[in-house]
Amino acid sequence: MLALLAAWVGLLTFLLFVIAMAIAIWAMWMLGFPVGLTAWLYLWAGITGVLWLGSRIRLGAEAVLLGRKLQCGIEPVVWSMTRSLLGDDPDSLLLPDNFDGLRSPQGRDYIVDSKPMKSLNRKVAQIEAGTIAVCGPRGAGKSTLLEKCVEQSNFGLVAHAPAAYAPHDFLLSLSVQLCEHYIRSEGYDTPSFARVSQVRRTLRLVKSKAIFLLKWLAFAIPAAGLLVLGLASTIRSAATQYTSAISAQLDQGAEWIRGPFGDIWQGNAVGASVSLVIVAAVWWRARRATWLRKLVREMWSAVALAFGFFLIIGVLTHFALDEWNIHHLKEIPFDTFVKLGFCALFWFGFTALRFTVGEFTLGRRKFTADSIFAPLAGLTGLIFLVRALRSPEIQTWLSAPENPLRITLLLVAIGMVRVSYWKPKPAEPILVTRCRNHLYRLQTTQTSSASLSAAGASHVLSIGANHATSISTVPPNFPELVADFRDLLAVIAAKFHREGGRVVIAIDEVDRLGSDAQALAFLREIKAILGVPHVHYLISVAEDVGAAFVRRGLPHRDVTDSSLDDVLYVDPATLDDSRSILDKRAPGLSEPYVILAHALSGGIPRDLIRYGRRIMEMRDRAGSDELTDISHHLIMEELSETLSGFRTLLSKQAWDPDTSEILVAFRTLGGHLRSQCSCARGSQYMALEQFAFHVLNIRPRGGMEEISHEARELIHEASTYAYFSLTLLGIFGAEGFGRRMDQATRNGPHGAPEILAEARLELAVSPHSARPLIASIRESWSLPAQPHSRRPIPQPRSGGCRIHNRV
């Protein structure tokens, strides 16, 4: 698209150049210049070139359209034939286009629009100000929602709640962040509190200013010297020629001014004197009028711009009508005009491409149009000047006696045009000054001292007094800090509200404070800063805090009832949402792998991206692109890591020789899971079945009553997770996934792929409710309900595999 745009820009530039050349040849022919047959042949060649270039662009556009039509017609046929050659289950191959998005979990370029984001925008738009809690499981994308909402606002910031917080420190940090963010948003630098002394800071400032002045003088002095040297003779001749006329005009103007003001000074014009007094009073009263300053600025810009343009037009007109210039212009060969015209054409084309073409990619690097075409434009401009100055005819033409004066006036006119756009730097806004002063108040301790001494004039007898006073500011306490923060934030929010903007303050990571009691205590402490007019607060909280808000009005009441105005619950992603996320981050990832990552993650976006990376990792580890191999390695490794975590938790319980059989079962299954050889899959499945179905039936010699309730719950959770992993192995580890998924969907609602993620989420609620759901899923997928007989878990094979040579 950019190449086509550049081609059209080039064609338009060339066409304009040909038209300009035709007009120039016709004008030269009408003025009597010796325009021969060669000039008309050049013109005809240019017109033919334009027609040829236009036909080439048209042919290229038609070729692109033909290619698109062929792609739309051929691609489905080729894709259909390829799928038929891959067999009954072509989607089981892992062939993604790229997975760069999986490598960057926090990449802002891979965020997709979601239902929670739309719901949050609606809730924010429905209230003018208030506090909205965003709750949901960890990893559901609450932080992303908050950051996205802050980005969409006109002014906002994200504050992170510390794990071990103190209300005063948190509010102090939030106040500093607010002031600094507002100062930067207005285009000013935040104050830096340097540790060096005032003398060293002054020396650094003087050094930087001196370096800047030296750099400026290094260019200003040579340029001024060359300008004075080049215009010295012209200025002297102009001064000699026009001094008397200018002096006469100045004397006439002075006499015109001296007449009325002299009468007023001598008292001969009383009415005019009274008028001047009134004008003086009105002028003094208008010193604070903003309209007057604006009017003066606008008049200055208009007058300077008009004067500059009229002076440019006058200089160019005088240059074009000069008979000396017309006479010597006829002596310049036409070939010189053509060469210079082509240089000007290329300069104009490169300059136009700088502003019409944006960024483009060449290989893996991105380039801007300015970085490519600006040097080319400068090079063609330099070639134009060199060619023009090397021509003897052009040198003679430029050596007119009045040309230096014309150049001087032209520079003055350009300077006036540039000056018309100059505006004095506006004074720092009052609100920025207030934020800067508030930063000094929060981050510095200011001390002021005064000393007074008096001594007599006599060298013999003197009477003196010395008095010193030191004043140090007291850091603000919490109530004062709250009042200052609310007042400052209210002023900032009112400013943006008048401009139709929105202010959003997001407080993230409140759900990481530990328990719900700590989160509620945090809300109770920061409740004082909520409720600022025209300010939307977004707070990420845990699920139990959101549940407490939902129960408001019931006998159970807490701080959420009066602190929060609304709650947005971020549900785990559905299968369609997970498909959109993975399609954005790993285009071309087929459906079975999307369902596998969705099932293992339970629809939690953070885990979904992690399992997407693990799928790519397992492909390299298994050395295969087949779903059966990749899913087997991934599920077994996840199960091995999870059971290791359960065994670590169980090791903290009290065990004895009579109850250690359960720990032995964990260790034996872990030995099976660590084997990566395909020969061991049968024994792995057998061990996993016995663990998932019968580990709870192990009866220690001392009886189950000797095992603590917490240990029994951990064992139940581990066996249910093993049951879930065994189900996933049965679904994804067998051939013909697509055919079996269609059959499972027809067998009942529990055969839908979405139910796998629901079972994973149910494991986090209770293993007792998750196991019946997993059993229903197995029934829909025609998997065995349980092993036919209970057998002890076989011991893992020791040593390496003699067939596959793996340890």
Image (tube, rainbow, N blue to C red):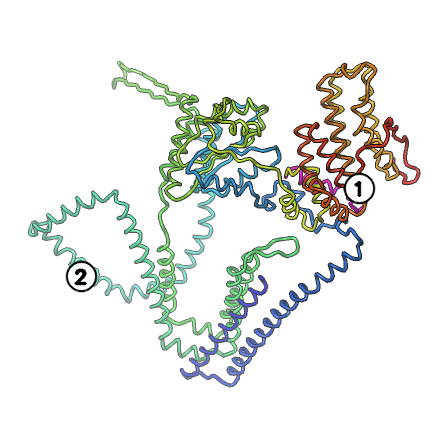
Instruction: Name the image quarter holding residue 331.
Output: bottom left
**Residue named by callout 2:** 252
Q: Which residues are magenta?
A: 605-634
Mark 1–mark 2 contact, CB under 8 Å? no
Which numbered tag is attached to residue 595?
Answer: none
Residue 601 is left or right of residue 629, and the answer is left
Q: CA distance from mark 1 to mark 2?
A: 106 Å
Query: How crowded is the residue under tag 1: few (<14 C-alpha within 10 Å), some, or many (20+)?
Result: many
Residue 73 seen by the camera: yes
Q: Which numbered disc flags the more N-terminal residue, 1 or 2?
A: 2
Residue 432 seen by the camera: no
Q: Nearer the viewer, residue 384 or 696?
A: 696
Measured from the top left, where is residue 207 in percent x and y?
46, 39
**Residue named by callout 1:** 733
User: Given the image, on which type of amino acid does mark 1 rest?
Assistant: Gly
The quadrant the N terminus occupies is bottom right
Relative to residue 454, is residue 208 depicted above or below? below
Q: Nearer the viewer, residue 367 or 724?
A: 724
Q: Nearer the viewer, residue 615 or 553?
A: 553
